[in-house]
Amino acid sequence: MRYASIPVVAGLLNWATNFLAVKMIFYPVNFVGLKIRTWPEQPFGLIGWTGIVPVKAASMASRMVRMVTSTLLDVNVVGKRVSAHQLASLLSSSIPELLQHIGNDLKVGAALGLPVVQIAARRVAKTFVVGFTGQMQKNIHEIVDLEGMVIRAIMKDKVLLVDLFQKCGELELQFVIRSGFFLGFLLGVVQMTVWMFWDPWWSLALGGMMVGYLTNFFAIKSIFEPLQPVQVGPWRIQGLFLTRQHEVSATFSTFFCQRILTAEKIWEEILNGERRRSFDNLLTDYAFDFVSERNLVFYPYKSRQSTEKLILTVLPELRRFLSEKMQVICPYMDSSLVLREEINEKMVAMSSEEFEKVLHPIFEEDELTLILVGAALGFSVGLLQAQAPSC
């Protein structure tokens, strides 16, 4: 029983150490410990720990969104899927309300209330919406910082990235934990054999360190290697993650487009994001050209300076209107952009080398750290195990 306990304990404790190592990838989201000294984008402090994914959220999010924008989505193509005429139709019922607000601001509300004026104004407003939507589509990169938007969203709520990686790699993470028991048990048999013939006090500690190191090493490597399928007799061997490309593609695209890259978040970025000023300038310039070409301003707004002043007066009302009507616009945009379908389709078509980079960063960033954590925990457990027979 004394010797038989060695592989059993090795298996159980390596299951526990692998479980802890996997949790340390994601948690804690914020540093826990004594913040005497920490290092940028490093999970460990002098005394304490931050989850690897949360502490490296900025670089991981940047890498992920570059993959999305360079490989999975063409922002110019996607933006043109929105029909300007459909947007104008969706907003048409709200245009009288907008015109009334603008009229009140300009002290001409009574005039805009006349049926004949309102009909003409609504026709002009719909033309404006169609034309300005086209301008937005042509200048999409100037008014939407897609990479910055995603990174800021994730940095604001790092749990988003944690949840994304956990959902995409759920089976692989479970494998890392479960393999700890089986690999630990097998290596524990070797430990037991050595202990039967040679039992210095430090051998179990050293053996525990080796078991902790090797179990994490083999578990992590088997997730992504080999990249290409290898036929070994009747078995076809490939990295576990790579065999689930279709399943992971569906999970990634659904999560990304429901939680991170939604039409509502894109609109919020356009109206209030880092490139808000570019959007305001585009709206102001287009509005000035629009009213000037159609001779829509009369005394006392006939001069360029007065026209610009008029437009700047109206601009806040237009921004408020667009912000309030997101619930009307966004469902249509989500359905017309078909982001989830496109991301899923292109992820499925990725090569193994490209697809591996979807999940590998969470291990690659601190693969050695995770392996060494397993070794350190195994060493500590081995020391305790060595003392057990004498107690």
Image (cartoon, rainbow, N blue to C red):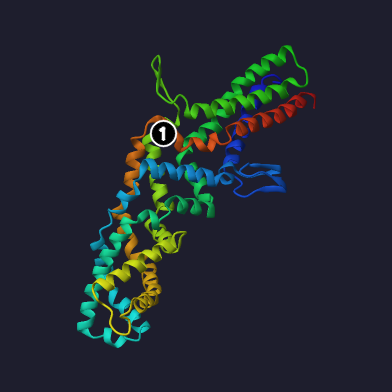
Q: Is residue 88 left or right of residue 357?
A: left
**Quarter assignment of residue 358:** top left
Secondary element type, mark 1: helix
Residue lying at the far right in this picture: please name it.
391
> Looking at this view, is 297 or 211 the one in front?
297
Residue 49 picture location, percent across and down: 66, 43
Q: Is residue 5 visible?
A: no
The residue lying at 75 percent from left, 16 percent from top is: 199
Q: Quadrant of the N terminus?
A: top right
**Residue at coordinates 32% horizontally, 81% vertically from top-left?**
301
Crowding at dot 1, Cα within 10 Å, few <14 / some 14-19 / many 20+, comes out as few
Position of residue 42 measured from the top left corner of the image (x, y, whole percent): 63, 41
In the rendered structure, which amino acid carries the disc numbered 1? Glu
Image quarter of the C terminus: top right
Residue situated in front as seen by the camera: 62 or 195: 62
Q: Quick check: 232 above or below 356?
A: above
Q: Quadrant of residue 41?
A: top right
Residue lying at the far bottom of the rendered structure: 110
- Residue 263 picture location, percent across and down: 37, 57
Residue located beneath label 1 in the image: 354
Left or right placement of residue 300 versus residue 41 in this view: left
Q: Position of residue 388 (x, y in %)?
A: 76, 27
Marks counted in the figure total 1
Q: Return the residue nearer the eye: 110 or 370.
A: 110
Single out the residue that lies furthest toward the top: 197
Answer yes or no: is residue 345 visible: yes
Give the residue at x 33% y 59%: 136
In screen coordinates, is 147 left or right of 5?
left
